Amino acid sequence: MGILDRVILIVYNFTLAFLSSLIVLLALGWTSPLLWLSSSLASGQGRVLVGLSGLALFLLSLRLIYLGFRRRYGGQTVIQETPLGEVRIALEAIENLVKKVARQVPGVRDVRAGVTNQPAGVAASLRITVSPDVNIPEVSDQVQNSIKNYVRSVVGIGVTEVRIAVENITNEVKRSRVE
């Protein structure tokens, strides 16, 4: 869901909250909104304003219904054309592969990765934690080469760049929780 759709959802929810509170107040006996609405509908400009407001809410509803039912492919994908058809590989799958390869390099304790699609392949950005007893430039080179070779052999897509940021140097191994 993009930023525009999130803004639409927020506006729609605030409008719905306002209208529902207004209905509750009407049920409790406050009739001023009904009198204002009936006087607005009596004039031409009022009908246009109420009609445009209703149309805007209707269009927002249609957009949100569309977002709820559209088919999702699990995020962005890398597409490969083969003689038998199209193969889509989710960037998340490549990201998991990159994490796995980087963790196998001796001296790497923890890995957080992101993968983006590039015209000539994919680019990986890693944030790693390493052991204090390793040579960071050597470990970085080893991680970069391992990722480049492994992704190429498994996925069949070239890795254009592997950016590494060493976030911490520690002996502790960060374990992820099972949810």
Image (cartoon, helix red, strand yellow):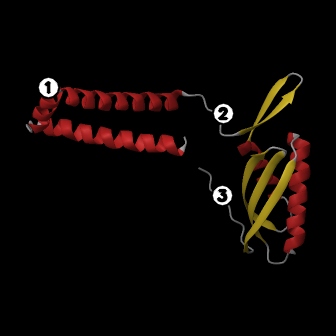
Is the N terminus in the top left, top right, bottom left or bottom right quadrant? top right
Residue at the spot 85% in from the left edge and 41% down from the top edge: 155
Pointer 3 local density, CA inside 10 Å: few below 14, some 14–19, many at least 20: few
Residue 10 lies, with reference to residue 144, above or below; the image says above
**Residue 179 disc label:** none
Give the percent coordinates (x, y) of residue 61: 40, 30
Relative to the observer, which residue lies in front, 77 or 110?
77
Give the percent coordinates (x, y) of residue 159: 85, 50
The reply to whether discs 2 and 1 touch (Cβ–Cβ < 8 Å) is no
Element at label 3: loop
Element at label 1: helix
For disc 3, the marked residue is 176
**Where is residue 173, by image quadrant?**
bottom right
Give the percent coordinates (x, y) of residue 75: 65, 39
Element at label 2: loop
Distance from disc 3 to disc 2, alpha carbons, whole Å, reads 26 Å
Give the residue type at disc 1: Ala
From the image, state whether disc 2 or disc 1 is nearer to you: 1
